[in-house]
Amino acid sequence: EEPARGPRKKTVVAVVGGGLVGSLNACFFAKRGFDVEVFEIREDIRQAKIVRGRSINLALSHRGRQALKHVGMEEKVVSQGIPMNARMIHSISGKQSPIPYGKKGQYILSVDRANLNKELLTAAEAYPNTKLNFDHKLQDWSAETGQMTFVRLDGSKEHIKADLIVGCDGAFSAVRKQFLRRSRFNYSQTYIPHGYMELTMLPINGEFAMKPNYLHIWPRNTFMMIALPNLDKTFTCTLFMPFDDFEKITTEDEVIKFFQEYFPDTIPLIGVDTLKRDYFRLPAQAMVSVKCSPHHINDKCVLMGDAAHAVVPFYGQGMNAGFEDCIVFDEIMNQFNEDLSAVLPEYSRVRVPDDHAIADLAMYNYIEMRAHVNSKWFLFRKQVDSILHFFMPKTIIPLYTMVTFTRTRYHKAVERWQWQNKVINHGLLISATGAAVGSAYLLIKNPPNINKLIIPAEKMWNRIVAFRTS
Ligand code: FAD
């Protein structure tokens, strides 16, 4: 007997958070034909005058681009970004030295966060099966029934049910709170001692104040400043510094003194008055690293983006990792034929090790960017890595390349990096030992004629004496 035919009940997916990852994820679920509802606490940023976010611009790289490509957004976003081919290291004396990110033609893109978010919201809204709900703050939800409670600005409450709840509500996720009440949920959160402050460098005579196709870095060991270009020819400079140091600077004169000591080349570019004003405009912001596992509850709820893995911003991977979450989930949906009871546990199994790995790598880069880039050994090793990569592109791949320009799983990239480091360091040790033993052998086999050394030395001495007495 044929089963009764009728319209198949559509799965309702509630995406909580209409930030970068939430709005992109809405496109992924809409593309599959689900009924998608996005719930965002803020007003519609496309109509708002001031958009508050976590940083003005950010670096988009391969993983993020692949996810955008999946929903047909890559070209549009890339055309609105500024390629950065290399880091530009600024020394205290003002000397600038570029360190390329990868091979020729490889670059990361500086994109405007607010603009990217607006584009993604518009793309999500273009699907007839997607509805965006602004001014909806998730207060609580039930893992048993899938019922969510939202609070509106006017104080009213709404109760809405969904088959799947996707928590994309950022580092301080309200969706995640429900996970914390459950047994066998692992959670850790670490605030680093550094805060960040953004300063704007305006164009000079209508042009970028510095070379635009670089991510500028002023590494000063315990703190640093970076600058990324914007389409309006400004740069957004971000000062990362321990809160204790931020707090020591309390007057306008102290700001200028501090910049004169550590970032003298930026004073004429940012401007004394702007510096004095902007430094005190907003307090330094905190940075948190969050790790948790699993990322799901039964077949009801899954966390993605910063809600699952807030990372410190030093690898430029937070958003990229969040965007990649969407592809990984999508791939598993294909693999398990959209059976959520199988997809969600598999997603946690596959993704947790990678999200933990990028959180660790970002912490590692926190030191590399502000301190290691000042070390000769580090720069030498970077050179060795790129030379070896040039000759053996499949065997030796620099860590930064794997993370930024490939979709190698983050935890595999870390494993491979550790293996490569062992091999290269052994190789360098063997070469250095070989060179020393070889020179010693040659010296023993062919002892230099001592007279040949003494005569020129005698001649040299005579010349010095002649010079001093002349
Ligand atoms: P968010 O962007 O935080 O969005 C969460 C959304 O959820 C927001 O719109 C929020 O309003 C909403 N929300 C929150 N609570 C609720 C609630 N209760 N109910 C409803 N809605 C809610 N990443 C990179 O890849 N490259 C970079 O160069 C880079 N630079 C960075 C620089 C800085 C200084 C910082 C702080 C971060 C940087 N990141 C970067 C990381 C990146 O900003 C985040 O990884 C990214 O924003 C994560 O997106 P998300 O959508 O998961 O979270």
Image (tube, rainbow, N blue to C red):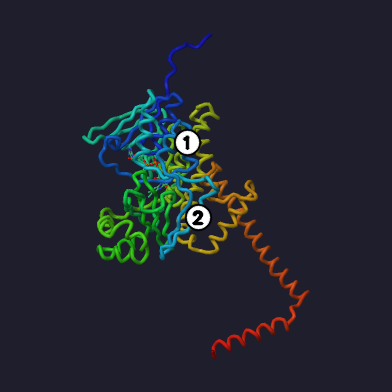
Q: Is residue 410 above or below residue 2?
A: below
What number is the disc on residue 99?
2
Instruction: Please give the name of the residue rendered at 46% of the width and 42% of the height, measured from the top-left corner.
Output: 320
> What's the amino acid at mark 2?
Ile
Rendering coords of residue 162 (x, y %): 38, 28
Eyeballing the image, is 463 above or below 68?
below
Instruction: Give x and y (percent) for residue 272.
Output: 28, 60
Which quadrant, please, contains the C terminus?
A: bottom right
Q: Is the distance from the Cβ of mark 1 to the nearest ligand 1 atom less than 8 Å?
A: no
Q: Depth-wise, is mark 2 or mark 1 nearer the camera? A: 2
Q: Secondary structure at mark 1?
A: helix
Does the beta carbon at disc 2 come under 8 Å from ligand 1? Answer: no
**Residue 353 seen anywhere in this rendered image of the structure:** no
Query: Callout 1, which amino acid?
Result: Ala
As drawn, the label of residue 382 is none
Extreme top residue here?
A: 1
Instruction: Tell me the residue that label 1 is attached to.
Output: 67
Pointer 2 and pointer 1: residues touching (CB < 8 Å)?
A: no
Q: Residues within 10 Å of mark 2 (few under 14, many from 20)?
A: some
What secondary structure is found at the residue carrying circle 2?
A: strand
Closest to the observer, 116 or 194: 116
Image quarter of residue 148? top left
Q: Residue at x 52, y 45 (%)?
A: 106
| Relative side of 369 to 445, left or right | left
Which residue is most to the front? 470
